[in-house]
Amino acid sequence: MTNNTDHQIKVNRAVKMSAIGSHPRSASAMLGAIPDDVIAALPARLIAQMIDANWQLAQASKALAVRDAIAEGMIWDAAQASHRDIAA
């Protein structure tokens, strides 16, 4: 999203209505995936639903990536703060 200043009141309302609105950076990232034309066309309630749907999609995608990494023999080494390949 490049410019939502024309719709800032609607966007602010949508963020407050969204389930992730209390997490400003996450809400902003999910809002950023919504095209300006869509924001212009939708009411705040539907924008809030899109923000939350984007969040759910991101969470599902991360979970799939973790499962795939584990299936490929990777683990998270918290002490080193990095992935380790245990298949080697």
Image (tube, rainbow, N blue to C red):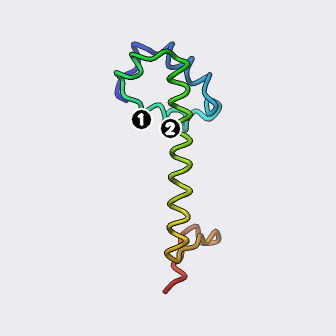
Residue at (49% x, 86% y) in the render: 88
Tell which tag, 1 or 2, sits nearer the viewer. Answer: 2
At horizontal 48% and vertical 37% (from top left) the residue drawn is 29
* Residue at the (58%, 67%) spot, across then down: 81
Q: Residues within 10 Å of mark 1 (few under 14, many from 20)?
A: few
Element type where label 1 sits in the image: loop
Residue type at the position of mark 2: Asn
- Residue under pointer 2: 54
Q: Is residue 83 above or below residue 21?
A: below
Gap in Å between the C-alphas at discs 1 and 2? Answer: 8 Å
Residue 20 on image: x %, y %: 62, 34
Of 6 and 33, nearer the camera is: 33
27 left or right of 78 in image: left
> Is 1 on the left-hand or right-hand side of 50?
left
Disc 2 packing (10 Å; few <14; some 14–19; many ≥20): some
In the drawing, what numbered circle is on residue 76? none
- Give above or below for 42 relative to 71: above
| Tag 1 near tag 2, CB within 8 Å | yes
Q: Is residue 79 above or below residue 21?
A: below
- What SS does tag 2 mark? helix
* Number of marks in picture: 2
The residue at 39%/13% (across/down) is 6
The quarter in which the N terminus is drawn is top left
Percent x, y for residue 49? 55, 27
The x and y percentages for residue 48 are 55, 25
Q: Is residue 86 above or below residue 82?
A: below
Q: Of the two numbered discs 1 and 2 on the same chain, state the one appearing first in sequence.
A: 1
The three-letter code of the residue at mark 1 reads Ala
The residue labelled by disc 1 is 33
